[in-house]
Amino acid sequence: MRSSNPILREKAFSVAASGEVMTMQGTVNKAVALLALLVIGGAWTWNLFYHQGIEAMTPWLLGGFGGAFVLVLLISFMPRLSPLLAPVYAVLEGFLLGGLSALLEQRYPGVVVQAVGLTVGVFFSLLVAYKLRLVQATAKFRYGVIAATGGVMLIYLVTMIGRFFGWYMPYIHDSGPIGIGFSLIVVVIAALNLVLDFDFIEHGAGRVDKYMEWYAAFGLIVTLAWLYLEILRLLSKLRSR
């Protein structure tokens, strides 16, 4: 049982429950709660941008990025803290997504509604397909998605390091055919990670302690946030042509 989501590590689910156990319904409830907090955080930076300007919004956006990154690491290595830290993460991630969304919405009106709609549509489509066993996380499927995700993360890491030294990776981040094709592939990879997350959470239910509902919901929100960002990036490239 493996997931390419760095949060939903197999080791985190390897400890048998000592009391009340994690359930699918409990995990869904926690995920909905975290998603609501993310939306609240996003609305905050969105409103700051449109009412007070980019100067007022930027510290919240940067704080959300830094804080969310730190909390991802903390929760990943200390799952027992997830009931306390996962809600904080959701708000901070909301600050980041809301700020970025406002910036792109100003440049490409309507792009955020499209990105949200597509993200929701992809999520529920894959959830239904998984429930009906139309899509299954077989061993080959799992390893393929893990390898592809690792490749994408490596490209992003090289890009970040390159920009630090003044080097820009050509084509894939542009709005040309190669850049759009790359973004489309990354969107598909991010979406397929949801299938692995569904499978991982399903196998964890009934085996581990109740607090792991927050941990699993947190991992699912991380994947959804990534999917939304990649869809937003793809739509922005298409609109900039």
Image: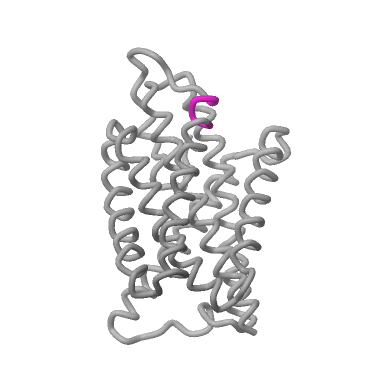
Q: Residue at x 58, y 71 (%)?
A: 182
Q: In this view, does 3 lie above or below 44?
A: above
Query: For this rendering, which residue is in front, 21 or 101?
Result: 101
Residue 102 location in percent, x, y?
49, 68
Q: In this view, does 111 lie above or below 123?
A: below
In which quarter of the view is residue 134 placed?
top right
Q: Residue at x 35, y 33 (%)?
A: 12
Figure quadrant of the C terminus: bottom right
Query: For this rendering, which residue is in front, 77 or 227?
Result: 227
Residue 200 location in percent, x, y?
50, 35
Query: For this rendering, which residue is in front, 214 or 10?
Result: 214
Q: Is residue 127 magenta?
A: no
Side (left or right) of 63 relative to 130: left
Q: In this view, does 40 lie above or below 233?
A: above
The residue at the far top in this view is 19
- Magenta-highlighted residues: 24-28
Q: Give the overall secondary structure of the magenta segment.
A: helix
Residue 30 location in percent, x, y?
46, 33
Side (left or right) of 210 relative to 182: left
Q: How many marks?
A: 0
Residue 60 location in percent, x, y?
33, 62
Q: Residue at x 47, y 37 (%)?
A: 33
In which quarter of the view is residue 107 placed?
bottom right
Q: How is the image coloured?
A: one colour
Q: Which residue is drawn at 47% across and 27% down?
A: 204
Side (left or right) of 128 relative to 183: right
In which quarter of the view is residue 7 placed?
top left
Q: In this view, does 162 lie above or below 44?
A: below
